[in-house]
Image (cartoon, rainbow, N blue to C red):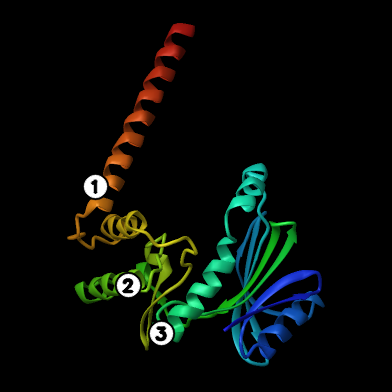
Amino acid sequence: MIVSRRLHGYHVHSRQPDDRYLSVFDDFMHGKISIIKVMRSNYKTKVWLIDTDWGKFVLKIFVPKQKKLERVIKSIFKRNYYVQLIRQINRVRKRGLNAPNDFYLLATKKTFNYVSTYIMLVEYIEGTELWNMPEITDELKQDAKQLIDELHQHDMISGDTNGGNFFVTDQGLRIIDLSGKNCNFIRRAEDRIDLEKRLGIQNTQKDLGYYIVTWRTNIRAYLKEFRMRLKSRADSISH
């Protein structure tokens, strides 16, 4: 169950029972976090591996910097992406699908419905990224395909099936950084096509979604090539 409340000026969504997650969030707000490792740090995203009284967690801070006007407009008409994601992960894990990394707490700083800051507390997975394995065996490929199929059966998508989002663990293959977008036949097809492109896992399901995605990709490639030709011609004329 996901519970929502206001804390420290943030809208906080956390999974019950949530005392420890709220305590970690409170420690963060008071600068008491113990950082083990900086996993990512750039102008809009910070990702830290942190140590707490309850073990290791991953803490993410995301401050969108680009396309602000577009984000403001979308916030009027669309539900919050990460709120959907924490609820989706809670739902599928209650149904027994434990491969996705758990999402414990989401805090958002909002102006009306526009979110300027996201703080996320998620599960830390001990394991090896799939693309760091000495060999991506047929067995691992089959596990990845089965995992994506199970996600789709539970109305979730990956949205990014690169090898860095799969982890080989003692408990089996796990997956991180899932998408909070609605699961439809086109996005399911995108996941399957992406698996084939990135990991060499053959897509055997060529349904309507497959043909729409393939057609769209070909059209975009043609338009990109057409624009490049126009630019090249314009440059040659100007010289």
Q: Which residue is mark 1?
A: 211
- Asked which quadrant contains residue 116, the reply is bottom right
Which residue is found at the position 36% from the left and 72% from the top? 151
Above or below, 188 against 147 in this view is above
Residue 12 position, x and y percent, is: 70, 74
Q: Earlier in the sequence, mark 1 or mark 3?
A: 3
Residue 239 visible somewhere in the drawing = no
Residue 126 visible somewhere in the drawing = yes
Q: Is residue 81 left or right of residue 157?
A: right
Callout 1 amino acid: Tyr
Instruction: Pick the residue in front: 14 or 193.
Output: 14
Q: Is residue 163 left or right of residue 73?
A: left
Q: Secondary structure at mark 1?
A: helix
| Total marks placed | 3
Which residue is found at the position 66% from the left and 55% from the top? 44
In this view, the residue farthest toward the left is 204
Q: Earlier in the sequence, mark 2 or mark 3?
A: 3
Q: Earlier in the sequence, mark 1 or mark 2?
A: 2
Which residue is found at the position 22% from the left and 76% from the top? 139
Q: Secondary structure at mark 2?
A: helix
- Asked which quadrant contains residue 56, the reply is bottom right
Q: Is residue 202 left or right of residue 62?
A: left
Q: Which residue is mark 3?
A: 95
Callout 3 amino acid: Arg
Q: Which residue is mark 2?
A: 153
**Callout 2–callout 3 Cβ contact below 8 Å:** no
Q: Secondary structure at mark 3?
A: loop
Callout 2 amino acid: Gln
